[in-house]
Image (cartoon, rainbow, N blue to C red):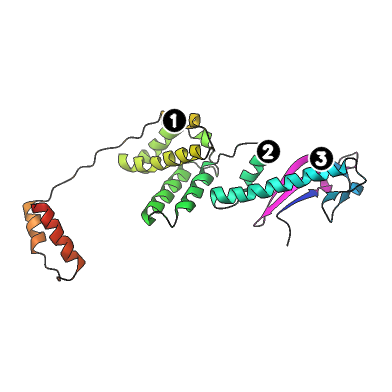
Amino acid sequence: MAQPVRVIAKKDKINKAGFIPLYLRIIVKRQSLFIGLGYSVRGEDWDITTSRIKKSYPNFKQLNALLAKKISDAEALLLESEMKFGKVILTYVKEKLKGKTYTDFFAYAEGQIRKETGKAKISTINNYNSSIAKLRLFHTNKNLKFDEITVEYLEKYEKFLREKLNNKVNTIHNNIKFIRKWFKQAIKDKLITSEEDPFIRFKLKKEKGTKTALTEDEIRKIENISFNDDTRIHDVRLLFLFCYYA
């Protein structure tokens, strides 16, 4: 079985001086990622079997130690990605290895949903997934950076939900509040800073729900419904009528 993380010399990229660049190769579920390490060696100085620099190369010990550190860092990031998102995301590993901040909103939100699956109510998970599906419908690109979600972006999304999907005010509120929820969590996880939170300025709108009281005729119908005494619905009916007249 091939190692998921390995240093390779890419002979197809040999330069005119005969030096071959070294790359970190990461393979996860048949997906490959290659990251240039900024070092090159001659073919005769590279041991293809052990993926190490031979003694014939100057400072081979220091360079081999550096390559081992790069492999160790990559393996740690594979585990970190699994912990954060519930799966390995190669883009996350790549950006972190290059010292960049990985801020893909979809990957983060879907990772949070996976963490809550089995703990939260099924209806809650369904609402989460529905909100992500709507956002993906609006945002046609595969990835969505946190810094793309600005006040202006949210205003356009709000308009999309209202005009294209015919969502009412409270439905729009419920969809966008999940985005706010994951922003707050990302700040707690130190993935982004509080200054990047658009919800400091973007305020969600919500309408008061209207409650319609039952008429006397409807109450009498409930009183006259007949259920078996040993059923739960019989008990619920009695409790309801008790609360109504109390």
The image position of residue 53, as x and y in percent, is: 86, 47
Q: In the rendered structure, which disc, 2 or 3, sits on the residue that comes first in sequence?
A: 3
User: Observer-nearest residue: 118 or 160?
Assistant: 118
**Magenta range:** 9-38
Q: Secondary structure at mark 2?
A: loop
Which residue is pictured at 65% across the width and 48% down the height? Answer: 76
The local crowd at label 2, few if under 14, some if 14 to 19, many if 20 or more residues have their Cα within 10 Å, is few
State the CA–CA distance, disc 1 to disc 2. 29 Å
Q: Quadrant of residue 222?
A: bottom left
Q: Position of residue 168 (x, y in %)?
A: 31, 41
Using the image, tell me which numbered label, if any, was put on residue 151. 1
Find disc 2 in the rendering and name its residue.
98
Residue 226 position by quadrant: bottom left
Location of residue 94 in the rendering, given as x and y in whole percent from the top left corner: 66, 43
Kind of residue indicated by mark 1: Val
Is 14 covered by the magenta stretch?
yes
**Disc 1 on helix, strand or loop?**
helix
Whether label 1 touches label 3, CB < 8 Å = no
Cα distance, mark 2 to mark 3?
15 Å
Please name the residue shown 33% across and 43% down the image: 171
Q: Main secondary structure of the magenta part?
A: strand
Whichever of callouts 1 and 3 sits on the residue coming sooner in the sequence is 3
Compare marks 1 and 2 and give the one earlier in the sequence: 2
Residue toward you, 212 or 138: 212
Residue carrying label 3 = 39
Q: For this view, does 10 lie left or right of residue 234?
A: right
Q: Label 2 amino acid? A: Lys
Give the structural element (helix, strand or loop) at label 3. Answer: strand
